[in-house]
Image (spheres, rainbow, N blue to C red):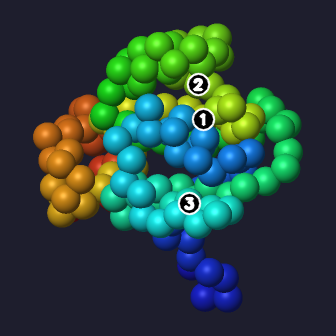
Amino acid sequence: MNNQRLRAVGINHVALEVGDIGEALDFYGKLFDLDLLGRGETDAFIGLGDQFIALFKGGTDARDTGRHFGLAVDDPAKGRAILESMGVALMPGKGVNFNDPWGNYVQLVTYEKIQFAKTPAVLRAMGMDDLEKTDAAKREMADKGFTD
């Protein structure tokens, strides 16, 4: 490793630009059980265990079609059903991909199938200690040395 460079450890938060903080909290509150860490006139912070999403009041309404972020969730199919009941248009394909009302492109991915892992203590604190990784995800994590 080159000691002249930083080592990235992970993502602490994702910041989204929204038109209205209250409307954004209402939208995301219909989809997720929100852990509201703080709210101001022009910002709000939603907890995701040891990470968070920051919402900031902005002025654009451009729809992202390539730039996006993926949220690991317990049940993407449930997310699909909730989004459909909210009248949110999903992008074509098998995944659960959508633009929020402010154009932010979001993907919902299943926690069990990805190499990303929360510590047992964080999962327990989030009430999600029943989540299990698939064998493929466990192999991928082991191949990278991410397991004990």
The answer to whether mark 2 and mark 1 are in CB contact below 8 A is: yes
In the rendered image, which residue does mark 2 sit on? 97
Mark 2 neighbour density, 10 Å: few (under 14) some (14–19) many (20 or more) = many
Element at badge 2?
strand
The answer to whether mark 3 and mark 1 are in CB contact below 8 A is: no
- Drawn side of residue 135 relative to residue 113, left or right: left
Element at badge 3?
strand
Quadrant in the rendering for residue 103:
top right
Amino acid beneath label 2 = Asn
The percent position of residue 123, horizontal first and vertical second, equals 22, 54
Q: CA distance from mark 2 to mark 1?
A: 6 Å
Identify the mark nearer the N-term, 3 or 1: 3
Foreground tag (3 vs 1): 3
**Residue at left offset 54%, top offset 35%:** 27
Amino acid beneath label 1 = Val
Q: Nearer the viewer, residue 79 or 123?
A: 79
- Drawn side of residue 8 relative to residue 33, left or right: right
The percent position of residue 148, horizontal first and vertical second, equals 20, 62
Identify the mark nearer the N-term, 2 or 1: 2
Quadrant in the rendering for residue 73:
top left
Picture layout, residue 16 above or below residue 28:
below
**Residue at left offset 53%, top offset 45%:** 25
Identify the mark nearer the N-term, 3 or 2: 3
In the rendered image, which residue does mark 1 sit on? 106
In the picture, the disc for residue 44 is 3
